Image (cartoon, rainbow, N blue to C red):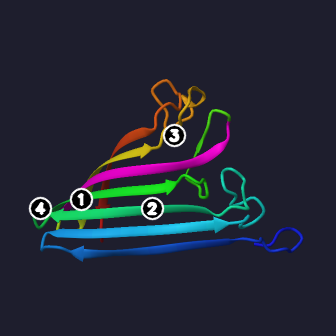
C-alpha cells in the first residue's frame, strides 16, 4: 500500500506453503501442513506490518508445521490429534510476546489438540468434544515473570501455557 504521499513501501513478503494428506489405512488418515515465510522492509500502510523490534532493514523469517491424525474407531466415531508448531522468534508476524518493559518480542508456540467426532441421526448431527493445550516460549528474567501469554488465577500474565476444553454440536440440514 502506498503511504500518504503515494510512495509504495520498499519491501517484500514471501510465503512458501505446502499441505497434503494420505489415507494410510482404511481407518487412519494422516495430513500435514508446512510453511516458511520471510519479510523485508515496512509493508502495508505505514506501520502496519513492522517487525516487533522495528528493524525493517533485516529480513525476518517465520515457519510453522502441523500434523493431523484421524482414526475411525467405528463408522460413527473418530478420534483425532493435531500437533502444531509456529516459530516467530524474529517477531516478524502477529504472534508475539510483550516483555516486562512493554516491548513486543518474537514468540514460539506449540499446540496439541485431541478431538472426538460422533456422527448421529444419519450424520445430520455431529458432536465434537475437544481438548487443546497451547504452550508458548517463556520470557526469561525476573522482569518478565508477569509478562507471559496467559493469565493465572490472580489476574497476572504469569503462565506460558493453557489448556482448553471445548465442545461443538453441528447440525447439517
Image point (17%, 68%), residue name: 28
- Of callouts 4 and 2, which one flags the residue occurring earlier in the amino acid sequence? 2
| Pair 3/1: label in front | 3
As measured in the structure, the alpha-carbon distance from the residue carrying label 4 to the one carrying label 3 is 36 Å
As measured in the structure, the alpha-carbon distance from the residue carrying label 2 to the one carrying label 3 is 19 Å
Residue 73 has which mark? 4
As measured in the structure, the alpha-carbon distance from the residue carrying label 4 to the one carrying label 2 is 29 Å
Residue 80 has which mark? 1
Q: Is residue 118 visible?
A: yes
Q: Main SS type for the magenta part?
A: strand
As measured in the structure, the alpha-carbon distance from the residue carrying label 2 to the one carrying label 1 is 20 Å
| Pair 2/1: label in front | 2
Q: Which residue does the numbered mark 2 point to in the structure image?
A: 64
Relative image position of residue 115 (x, y in whole percent) = 26, 55
Magenta residues span 102-119
Q: Is residue 43 left or right of residue 70?
A: right
Q: Secondary structure at mark 2?
A: strand
Residue 20 has which mark? none
For the view shown, which residue lies furthest in the right direction?
A: 5
- Residue 116 painted magenta: yes
Q: Is residue 65 left or right of residue 123?
A: right
Judge by depth and name the residue closer to the eye, 40 or 4.
40
| Pair 4/3: label in front | 3
Residue 149 has which mark? 3
Relative image position of residue 147 (x, y in whole percent) = 57, 34
Amino acid at each position: 500500500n502506498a503511504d500518504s504521499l503515494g510512495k509504495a513501501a520498499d519491501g517484500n513478503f514471501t510465503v512458501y506453503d505446502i499441505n497434503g494428506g494420505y489415507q494410510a489405512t482404511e481407518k487412519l488418515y494422516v495430513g500435514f501442513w508446512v510453511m516458511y515465510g520471510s519479510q523485508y522492509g515496512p509493508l502495508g500502510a505505514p506501520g502496519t506490518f513492522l517487525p516487533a523490534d522495528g528493524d525493517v532493514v533485516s529480513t525476518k523469517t517465520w515457519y510453522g508445521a502441523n500434523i493431523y491424525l484421524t482414526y475411525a474407531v467405528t463408522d460413527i466415531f473418530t478420534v483425532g490429534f493435531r500437533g502444531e508448531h509456529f516459530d516467530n522468534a524474529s517477531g516478524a508476524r502477529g504472534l508475539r510476546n510483550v516483555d516486562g518493559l512493554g516491548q513486543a518480542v518474537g514468540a514460539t508456540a506449540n499446540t496439541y489438540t485431541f478431538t472426538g467426532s460422533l456422527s448421529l441421526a444419519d450424520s445430520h448431527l455431529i458432536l465434537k468434544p475437544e481438548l487443546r493445550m497451547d504452550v508458548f516460549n517463556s520470557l526469561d528474567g525476573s522482569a518478565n515473570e508477569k509478562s507471559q501469554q496467559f493469565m493465572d488465577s490472580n489476574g497476572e500474565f504469569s503462565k506460558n501455557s493453557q489448556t482448553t476444553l471445548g465442545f461443538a454440536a453441528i447440525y447439517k440440514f
